[in-house]
Amino acid sequence: MSGNGFRVEHRYLELPNSFYTRVKPTPLKDARMVCFNHSLAEDMGFRADSEANWTGIGAGTELLEGMDPVAMKYTGHQFGVYNPDLGDGRGLLLWETVGPDGRRWDWHLKGAGMTPYSRFGDGRAVLRSTIREYLCSEAMYGLGIPTTRALFMVSARDPVRRESIETAAALVRVAQSHIRFGHFEFAAHHEGPDAVKTLLEHVIALHFPHLIDLPEDERRSRWFEEVVERTARLIADWQAVGFCHGVMNSDNMSIIGDTFDYGPYAFLDDFDAGYICNHTDQGGRYAYNRQPQVGFENCRFLATALLPIMDEDDVRRGLRRYEVAYNDRFLQNMRDKLGLAQEEESDLSLIMDTFSMMHEHHVDYTLFFRAISNLHSRGHAPVRDLFVDRSVADQWLERYEERLLKEPRAHDEREYAMRGVNPKYILRNYLAQQVIQEAQNGDYEPMKALLKVLERPFDEQPENEAYAALPPDWGKHLSISCSS
Ligand code: AMP
Ligand code: MG
């Protein structure tokens, strides 16, 4: 490491020791550095002159001075059922660092081997799922949506049994916090009110410093409102880009409102409101159109965990923020996507009808919004081409053009703004699938090339047009299993 400009802290260890267990990583065999996020390292306050120097950290064979790895204890509701036995089953919090800009970063090594919370798992992460997490967290960041990040990943030779035998990998995931709703559920349901209080004050001190000086009751209720609102806004942002998380269990909900734990996620290709990306989710509990409701249910689980230390009315009031925050953000997102600066009463029905039309006619979600972001520079054809029945497109375009007459902005000004919110490039499942196959054959260049494209999803990048194409037939509706 050089130009090391961060300070090491490990504030998580200030929590009562029931919140963690010290565990050393179990080494991986013949690990190799395959991808390192240099610009993120710079944001965190250091420069990695030699990527290879970090391989040992990823492989679990080396720790830097100050690293004190712990598996965090949490519980949570999985598919609606409470599970008291959860915790970091294959990840370890190595340490926390604070960069020159004051930003705090948890370093979490995912795939580090078994812990007391591994239950039936082997403590490992496979190459396929590690690449998927790396790609998607960086894609989300590029889209401007709060998320954990990927600092670097190593691949190894250790065989890992999933549906078939795969190989192991490990990811150093970083985030301002790795504390989940499930941490609060653990505290409330197993440790008692003091533990909830300690955890809550810890989270406020580290991540909500603007609330510290408020009187206790107000501090707690304002904090809960903020958590609820951040969660609601996050999900409104997912809906706007067509992101399906796939496993919205309460242990996968970040207390600071990051997109957290990338498993069988997907971005919509053709719009399907009830799309289920996780093939183990047969009931569609976490389908695309259920995400807003599930986000609320998760806030309710958090609310229940806060009842021992908060006034019931304050908790209720906090929960009520969800619907307002979600609706406001969602409406604003959709107005921005359609380029509607002037508020008209009929806008909501235009938005809902647009969704119904896309659903009924299987229109590609991303390409549709990108095409209407270039309507007056490139004409109707790119929009019409997304429809089997062109007359449906024509009818919609007629209505839309009429609505645009009420807009104060010039076409080019509006469309410029629209291209800043309607991405040209998203991480389609088939794109991830392709680079995973290349990586499994030892070539990581395609993964890096894809990452470069996803860094700037709103830019035209004419040289990368191929990444913006419709998925090939084999690449539609890839269903991803939870086993990662
Ligand atoms: P997830 O569905 O990935 O959020 O995981 C749910 C829980 O299972 C978490 O507590 C994970 O740490 C744990 N887990 C997932 N995969 C494994 C694994 N391969 N070995 C041990 N624990 C795991
Ligand atoms: Mg998880």
Image (cartoon, rainbow, N blue to C red):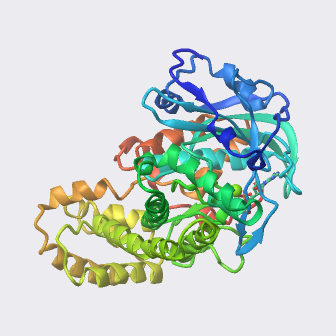
Residue placed most toward the observer, 154 or 177: 177
Taking 47 as reference, is 392 left or right? Answer: left
Q: Residue at x 39, y 54 (%)?
A: 424
Image position of 44 with respect to 386: above or below: above
Q: Is residue 371 left or right of residue 480?
A: left
The image shows residue 94 at horizontal and vertical percentages of: 70, 34
* Residue 452 on image: x %, y %: 48, 38
Regarding residue 446, the answer to whether it shows in the image is: no
Kindly tell me whether residue 156 is visible in this rendering: yes
- Location of residue 345 in the rendering, given as x and y in whole percent from the top left corner: 21, 83
- Quadrant in which the N terminus is drawn: top right
251 sits to left or right of 366 = right
In front of the other: 457 or 232: 232
Which quarter of the rendered picture does the C terminus lie within?
A: bottom right
Residue 376 pos. (x, y %): 19, 63
Task: Name the residue located 47 percent from the left edge and 47 percent from the top edge.
Answer: 141
User: In the shown orientation, is residue 48 left or right of residue 393?
Assistant: right
